[in-house]
Amino acid sequence: MSSTSANKKEIVDFLWDWGEAHGDWGKLLVGNIVTTEKPLTATTRQQVFELFLKSIGLHSGIVASVPSKPSYSPTTKRIELTSLSKVTGVNRLAKDQTISFSPNITVIYGENGTGKTGYGRILKALGISYDACNTIHPNIYESDDLQSAEIKFQVDGNDSLFTWDGSNSDSDLQNISVFNTNCVEISLSDRTLIVFPMGFHLFNLISTELGELDRLRALEIAKHSSTLGWVGSLTPGTPQHHFAVNLSSFSSEVNLSTVSGFGPDQVKELGKKEKELTDLNRPLLEHEIAQSKRCERELDEMFTKIKQIQSDLTLVNWESVLEIDGKLVGLEKKARLGIKDAAASKGIALYESTEFRQFINSAEAYIRLLGKAEYPNSKPGDICVYCQQTLGEEAKKLLADYRALLNDSTQGEIARLNESRRNIITKVENINPDNTLHQPCFGTDSEGKAIQPDALTTLNEQIAAARNLSLTTPTNSNAVFDVNYAECLSELSSQKSALESSRTIAEGKLANIEPKETQLKTAIAELKDRKLLAQNISEIKTAIQNKKIVKTLNDNSTAFNSRSISLKTSEAREHLVKENFDSVFQDELRRFRKSHIQVDVNFATERGKNTLSQNISSFDLKEILSDGEQRAIALAEFLTELQLETNTAPVVFDDPVNSIDHKIIDEVARRLVDLSKDRQVVILTHSVLLFNSFLYLSGIPEFKTVVKFRFLNTNNEYGVTGIVSDAEELSSAKTKITKINELCNAGSGSGMSEKDLAESCYSHLRSAIELCVEHEVLHGTVKRYQKNVALTQFAKLDGDKIKLHRDKLNELFERCCSFTEAHSKAEGIANDPSLAEFKVDFEEFKKIRDAFIK
């Protein structure tokens, strides 16, 4: 709500003091707020923010010029409601009704549930109230209707039209103030004022703008992100990780250089460490150790095998074969000569052939096998062991010569030498000339097969040659027997030693793998983190710079704190509001006869807004005052606040006298009529006492010529509420007679049964009789719901007419009562009226009434 009252002291002085304390940006902010009395435009707000950035060293460009101290003259407006019409979708209000408002005071009377509060809710949704709840429910029976209403009003005499759609608002209509039943409890609680007195809305605008500027500060912080998305790739615990996660505005490029250096030396070192770590692989080491042991065992086995071959296939053995072969040649030559002598004389063919020698040797062996040591003997008739024919003497002699040659010492020596030779040859025959390593003792080739050392390959070739030489009974004594066992054994031994040495190292690594592995991983992690930092050096430098900017922005976050403007608001309020509020509030209490209640009123400031609290000797008013006293004080505070600003906008009171003692209802009515002289007042009430009080005041000279009254009534008809009609004759018999005629004329078209229609007619007739007695028989000498007696009307009474018609009127009244539902149930009577009977009684009543009004 715009401020409209003049100040004892210029409020701009307080605002400018605050602006100057905040430098150029504060002065630009105050200058624009005071000049426009509106929130800053986005462009101006950005200019204010840029001046703020400049003040803290974060902006060096061109910014807006700083204004000088502005002047301030509050504007005034007179706002008057003209009409409220075309209502749809609000509760069960009828759609075709129009409320025309008086420029001073409009009183809308209606019983509960007749729709008057529905109209009040629309006005409350447009304006302001202690009660901030503006929920308006649609007609639950016609929920498809959209909420809308048409409001005609004037601003400083100029006509305006606003179409409400259930959620929109009008800046002028927002000045409407509304007081309802809910406002009482809220009013007595700690709360903000519903108006901005004497330009204090400017403080709230500045407070709101401070929030917007702080939002810009947050956006500026967001623009300077220092998040390094790759930090999660660093290894916790490394100097690089510590530097990155603790990056701040104090981080230096010198420290960055220290932890991010990564050149050729570091590349080489990283490769070396990774190789060492790979070598420390536990499964790999365990496999390496097991493989080494297998190779060592196989080398041992090969070493033993070759030593055995060396023992079986030596130069000495080969030379022994040569020597035996030489001896055998001599002995066999000698044996052949003996055979020759024995065979030649007998004409034996081919006696020098090997087959012959084998033949006679086999024959000798066969004879021995038969156990015929003396064969052939000298006895006559000796037979041949082969053919079983009798041997002649020549045959005996030849066999005896052969056996003698085969059993002499030469043959024995030949047999011995052949045995020795066979032993040597057997050993040679059992030697394997293809000695192969199956384990990768010397590595593997491209096909994954074990590599055979050259010395072993050569040795196999030499063994094969020497073996072949020995087996073929060499006759050339000059043949070379060349087997170099020493070279191969040396190479196998050396390789085994190398394997043992590597295994020892591997076993040492395995025994100390955990600390070494940790050491290498730590070193590798640091080197890798160095590399990562080196790759992102530019991003890190930008992040450090952003950290510095963000720190500066955070260090100056209190610049936009509303506390300073709240303090200035409190200072201004002490000078410009508090004293006046207290005096006006006490005066309002006196008008409601509540000045004896010593209410302590206290002001405070919350985010630039004026807040108010009240108590009695530190006690909460709601704890110690009656409902009526609470309502009276709430009304007094509400009226006081309205006087803190001079916008003459409408004020709406919805049932303002609930719980108020009937003794002060007249005072409330008189106070609201007085208020209507300055601003438009709308009263919504179901209190007959309050309605009649306004009705009475409308007729007295004090108000009759200066205040324009309008009295309206709301009723229900056929399922809808808020049927609006003039209420000047709210309490007249004529109004009831008109209603009865409407019902009788409607007949069956009314939608009611005859019984219900007749009951409704009797109900209206009962009220008509009461009103006739009050206004036309007694001439208003005594009125219902009013405490005074009009003695000036007493002389108009006609006793003769009263005596003549009183019994009949009483009879008609009792009959009306007997047809009401409540009466019938109370008496236990089932008495259904008929429309025909009613018309008879109605005509009788009209005749009696005519006698009094003529």
Image (tube, grey):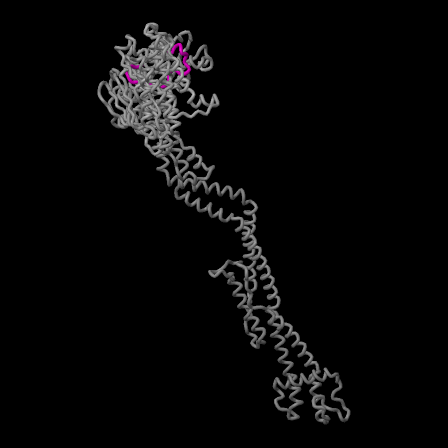
Q: Residue furthest right?
A: 379
Residue extent of the magenta highlight: 643-665
Q: From the image, which quarter does the C terminus lie in?
A: top left
Relative to 345, 481 lies left or right: left
Q: Check if residue 653 falls in the magenta segment.
A: yes
Who is closer to the viewer here, 519 or 235?
235
Task: Determine whether 724 is above or below 775 in the image.
Answer: below
Task: Determine whether 316 is above or below 214 in the image.
Answer: below
For the stretch drawn in magenta, the main secondary structure is: loop
Name the spot of residue 712 as percent of width and height, x first: 31, 19
Q: Check if residue 830 falls in the magenta segment.
A: no
Who is closer to the viewer here, 105 or 66?
105
Picture quadrant where residue 41 is located: top left
Relative to 337, 588 lies left or right: left
Name the spot of residue 846 as percent of width and height, x first: 33, 18
Task: Determine whether 606 is above or below 312 in the image.
Answer: above
- At a point 39% along the width and 8% down the height, the residue shown is 593
Name the spot of residue 276 as percent of width and height, x first: 49, 47
- At a point 27% along the width and 14% down the height, the residue shown is 708
